[in-house]
Amino acid sequence: MYGLSRGKRESFSPFSIFISRIPMSTKGQHCSSIHVSHHLQNAANLSRSSPARSDGVAPEMSHVCSYMDHANSKGIWFGDNPLLFYVPSLLLQLSLINVVTKCFHFFLKPLGQPAIISQILAGVFLGPSVLGQSTTFLTNVFPNETRVVLETAAAFAFMLFIFLIGVKVDPTMVFRTGKQPLIIGILAIFVPYGLSNFVAFLLQKHVYLDQETFEALPFIVAVQCMTAFPVVACFLDDLKILNSEIGRLASSSSIICDVCNWGIMMINYTARLADRKSFRITIGSFFSTVLFLVAILYGIRPAALWAVRRTPEGRPVKEIYICAVLVTLMICGFIGELIGITAFGGSLALGLVIPDGPPLGAALEEKLDSFVHVFMPLFFAVSGLETNFSAIKHMEHVGVIQLLACVSIVGKVLGTVLPPLFLRIPVRDALSLALIMNTKGIAELGFMIQMKHMNQLTEEPYTVMVISVVVITGVISPIIKVLYDPSRRYLAYRRRTILHLRRNEELRILTCLHSPETVQAVISLLQASNATKESPITIVVLHLVKLVGRSSSLLVAHRQHEKSSSKRTQSEQIFSAFKKFEQLNVGRVFLNNTFKGISPYATMHNDVCSLALEKRSILIIVPFHKQYIYGETVETSSALENLNKKVLDKAPCSVGVLIDRVKQKNPRYILSEQLLQKVAVIFFGGADDREALAYGQRMSENPSIQVNLIRFITSDSENVVGGKERSKMLDAKILSDFKHSAKTTSCKQVSYQEEEVSSGKDVVALTRSVGDANDLVLVGRRHGESDIMHQLKEWRDRGELGAVGEILASPEHNCAASVLVLQQQTKLWGLQDPEESTHLRKCDL
C-alpha cells in the first residue's frame, strides 16, 4: 500500500509503564509522552535487532523531555527558542522545504526533469546526506522534539494526495481498456517480476549477502517491478503528452499494472499474516477490510452519485456536499487505522468511489489541490531525512540492488515493446512507451518508507533504492522527449486546403467548440458555405472540455441516448444542434461523428490535430479566445489563446479562427434563417489570403450570399505586402479567376473593388468600414513583410490572428460582422513551406 507506516504493531507495555513512572523535572516541565513513545519505539525496534545481554539487563534507552505547552513560542525576547516549539518549527520547515524544492526545479526543469526529481533531491539535500551532516543544522531546523509533528503533517498531506488520486481515477477503465492495454499491462508486470525473482533466487544461492540484504531482496524486487498509475499520470502530465496516442496507451496499461501489483501485494500480505499471526487475527483482518469496502461501495458511493445528480451542469457543488465528503474522509482514515489498512488505504478506497470529473471530483480537486501541493514536499523531506549516503558501506550490496533494477527494466521493456511491435506501432513509439512504464515516483517512495519503518528495509538498501529512483526517472525523461514528438505524426501527405479542393469533392470540416454559445455562429458559417449534393459538407464536431478532477484524458465518440432528458449536458446540446442542422440539409450536409475531448489546455491541440488527421479534414474551425455577447467583450483565459496558437502551428490542414459577433437576443439555435448574407474578402496577397478568397468563391455559389472582394493596393497598383515571384504569380491567377467570375455573373452576387492605401492608418480605417457594411469578413492570418504591415503590427499586439485579424477583433472595432481568420496548411510531408514547392506548381495553378 502506498504510504507511510508507524512500524510494527507489537505491544510495548513495559515501555508504557516506564513512561508513566518518569518523574516531573524542573518547574513547568514534563516529559512529553508523544515524544517519548516515538523515540522509545525506535529503541524497541533497535532492541529487537540487537543481541540480548548475557546478564539479562535490557539495553540502555534514551528519552526526550520537553515542555507540556509546546505548541507556540512566546518569542525570543522572553527567552524562548522558537525552533523547539511545534508551530514555528513546522512553519520554518515547510517554508524551507518549498523554497529548496523550487530552486532545484528552477535549474532542473530546462534539462527536461519532472517535478518529482526536484522534490526528492530537495529532501535528500536537507537530510543527513548533505546539510544534515551539520549537527547544528539538524538539531535546530529538524530537532527531535518537533520531528513527530513534521512526520504527522507529511502523513496527512500524503493521505489527501492519495485521496485525490483515487478521486481522479475512474475504476471502470479497467473493464474498458481494450485488448492492447490489457496485454501490455499484464506483461509489463509479470515479465519483469519473473525475471527479477529468478535473478534474486540465483543471488541468494551463489552470492554471499548479509542477513539484512538477503531478507530485503523480495521487497527490492517488488519496488523495482512496480508501475503505478499515479506516477505514470503525473509523468505524462509533466511531459505534456497525457492525451497523445502513447500517453493514453500508457495510462490504460499502467492501470492494469497497478491492479496486478495490488493483487500480488495482497496475496503476499495475507500469506505473511497467516504465517506469522494466529488464524483469528487473519480472519478478523480480512473480514473487517471486506466489510469496510462494502460499506464504502454500497453506502458512500450512492450518496456521492445522489449529490452529483442534485447539482445542475455548470453550477458549483453545494458547500455542504464538500464538507460531508471531507468529514467522511477523516472517518474512513480513522477506520483504516483501526482495522490495520492504515489511513492511506482508507482514503484511497473512499477516493475511488467518488465520481471523477465535474462536478464533485472537480470541486474536490479545486479545494484540496493547492493545499496538497504546498504540504506534499514535507513527504519528500521526510524521505530525504531517512536517506543517508554515509550508510552505504558495502559496494557489493549496491551492485546487487542495481543489478535487480537493470533486470526489472529489461523485463519491463521486453513485456511492453513486444505487443506494440506486433501491432506495427513504430519502434520509436514502442520504446517510448516502454520507458514511460519504467518511471518511478511517489508510489515507490511511499512503499519504500513503509518497508523501512517496518524494519524490512535497512538504511543502506533504502538509500541505494532512492538513488535508483532518481537516476531511472531522471534519465528516462529527456530520452522520451527526444524519441517521442506527437506533432510529428500530424504531417499530411497531400494538400488539405480549400484552394486545392477539387470542384465536386466533399468539404470535410472539423468544428471545435468549448460551449454551446458559439454553436449558432458556426452553423451560420456552414449555411453560407454552399453545401450541395455534388459538393457536400461533412462535419466532425469536437466538444473540448478542460481536464479537471481526472487523472487521464479522454477522447470518446458521443452516443445518443434513446430517451431524451430535460436536463441535457452541454455536449448533448451542441451535438443535437448539429444533428438538427443535418436533418434540415439532407443529402447536402453529413454529420460524420461527434466527439468529446477531455484534456489539459496545454495538450488539447493533440486531440484537435489527431482527429483532423484521422478524419482527413480540409478545414479546422476553432473559436476565438474572446467572446462577444450583446456588444460586450468577455475575455477568456489565455489558455484558449495558447491552444489556438498550437493548433495553427501543428494542424495537418487549413485552420480558421472564428470571431463570433452574431447578435441574437434569443440564445436558442436558429437554423431556419440565413444569418449571413453579405460576405467580404479582404485581400493583401499571400497563401492565407488566397485560402480566404477560395472560401469566398465557394460561398459566392450560394444564391443567398453576396461576396465582395476588396483588394488593398499601393499607389503603383502593387500588392501591399511583399512576396516571392511565385507567390505573386499565384495571387494574380486567383484574382484573375475571381474578376472573370464577377464580370460574367449577371446579378450583383459577386463584386470586386480595389482600395489604394499608403499607410497603416489607411488600412485600419478601410478595414473598419468593411466590417460595418458586411455580416462576415474573411481575411488571411499571415502576410509578407512591408512598411505598412510593420505599422499595423506596432499599432496592435500580435496574437493568434495576425496583424489584420487583430484589427478586426479589437474591442474598438465595434461592428456587427463576424470574422473568420484563415491560415492555409503550413506543413506537408517533406516540405517546410508548401508554397515554395516547384513540383506542385501545376496543382496550384
Image (cartoon, grey):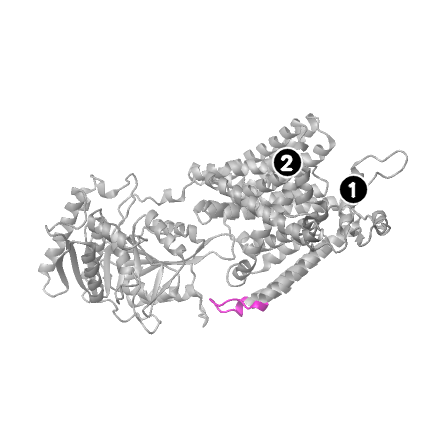
Residue at the spot 59% in from the left edge and 56% down from the top edge = 352
- Residue 832 sits in quarter: top left
Along the viewing direction, whichever of 689 and 302 lies nearer the viewer? 689
**Which three-letter amino acid code belongs to the residue tagged 1?**
Ala
Q: Which residue is mark 1?
A: 43
**Mark 2 element type:** loop
Residue 589 has which mark? none
Q: Is residue 833 above or below residue 319?
A: above
**Which three-letter amino acid code belongs to the residue tagged 2?**
Ser
Residue at the spot 17% in from the left edge and 51% down from the top edge = 720
Q: How far across and down, in percent of the image, does residue 591 sit?
A: 33, 60
Within-10-Å neighbours for mark 1: few <14, some 14–19, many 20+: some
Residue 129 has which mark? 2
Left or right, residue 479 beside residue 695? right
Q: Is residue 313 magenta?
A: yes
Would residue 587 be visible to someone looking at this image? no
Alpha carbon separation for disc pair 1 and 2: 22 Å
Left or right, residue 437 beside residue 592? right
Would residue 701 be visible to someone looking at this image? yes
Q: Nearer the viewer, mark 1 or mark 2?
A: 2
Residue at the spot 67% in from the left edge and 47% down from the top edge = 4
Q: How far across and down, in percent of the image, does residue 432 sit?
A: 47, 39
Within-10-Å neighbours for mark 2: few <14, some 14–19, many 20+: many
**Mark 1 element type:** helix
Along the viewing direction, whichever of 709 and 525 lies nearer the viewer? 709
Q: Along the polypeptide, which appears first: circle 1 or circle 2?
A: 1
Left or right, residue 358 beside residue 87? left
Left or right, residue 80 beside residue 533? right
Q: Is residue 333 above or below residue 225?
A: below
Q: Main secondary structure of the magenta part?
A: loop
Highlighted range, magenta: 308-320
